[in-house]
Image: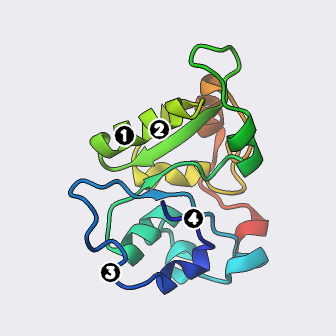
Amino acid sequence: MVTVPEKSVPDLPAGFLTGAAEGSVVIDTCNYYPKQRDGRIAAIEDGLTESEWVAQQIGHAVVKAFNNIHYVHLLENGLPAGTPGRIALPIAGDSAADKAIVARLVDELGFDPVDTGSLSESWRQEPGHPAYVADLDSEGVRQAFAEATHERPADHIA
């Protein structure tokens, strides 16, 4: 799991994934805050999603998940499967197998996984978009994704 400020991703130790088991899944939970914390990251400003950039930086495929829920809600608000109003978490990635592994983890932690497509579509769960830290159920996540526009909010532009 990569959970560091976006600006710190290039500073991760070289080869930190060396020795990882074959088929290991890397979950990217990072969020880019250019004005508040991270400064300008040109590749993201030029159109890469945050997670596409992270994958390039670490040299390994990632699944974007757990980035759009407040950590306290992740700790305290999990519910059994089938509970009405259960919070849903979007999962984006380019490998169906990797997303399935992350979906099982999301479910085991008490949240409904929602496959939201490829990593190139993960911008819809980034800061400033309707699904971000909104604690929506599955239908709410799908609706928020449908309503999202690709334009980044002004407070998230470096």
Q: Residue at x 59, y 39 (%)?
A: 145
Label ID, residue 41 = none
Q: Choose between 89 and 131: the one closer to the eye.
A: 89
Label 3 to label 4, Cα distance in Å? Answer: 17 Å
Disc 3 is placed on an element classified as: loop
Q: Position of residue 8 (x, y in %)?
A: 57, 81
> How many numbered marks appear?
4
Label 3 CA crowd tier, 10 Å (few <14, some 14–19, many 20+): few
Amino acid under disc 2: Leu
Amino acid under disc 3: Gly
Label 1 to label 3, Cα distance in Å? Answer: 23 Å
Write down the residue under mark 4: 3
Label 4 to label 2, Cα distance in Å? Answer: 16 Å
- Mark toward the start of the polypeptide (1 vs 4): 4
Write down the residue under mark 1: 101
- Mark toward the start of the polypeptide (1 vs 3): 3
Q: Residue at x 73, y 46 (%)?
A: 133
Instruction: Tell me which corner region of the image, top left, top right, bottom left or bottom right, holds residue 104.
Output: top left
Write down the residue under mark 3: 15
Write down the residue under mark 2: 105
Disc 1 is placed on an element classified as: helix
Compared with 14, 70 (above or below) is: above
Residue farthest to the left, as pictured: 22
* Callout 3 touching callout 2 (CB < 8 Å): no
- Mark toward the start of the polypeptide (4 vs 2): 4
Q: Choose between 116 and 46: the one closer to the eye.
A: 116
* Callout 2 touching callout 1 (CB < 8 Å): yes
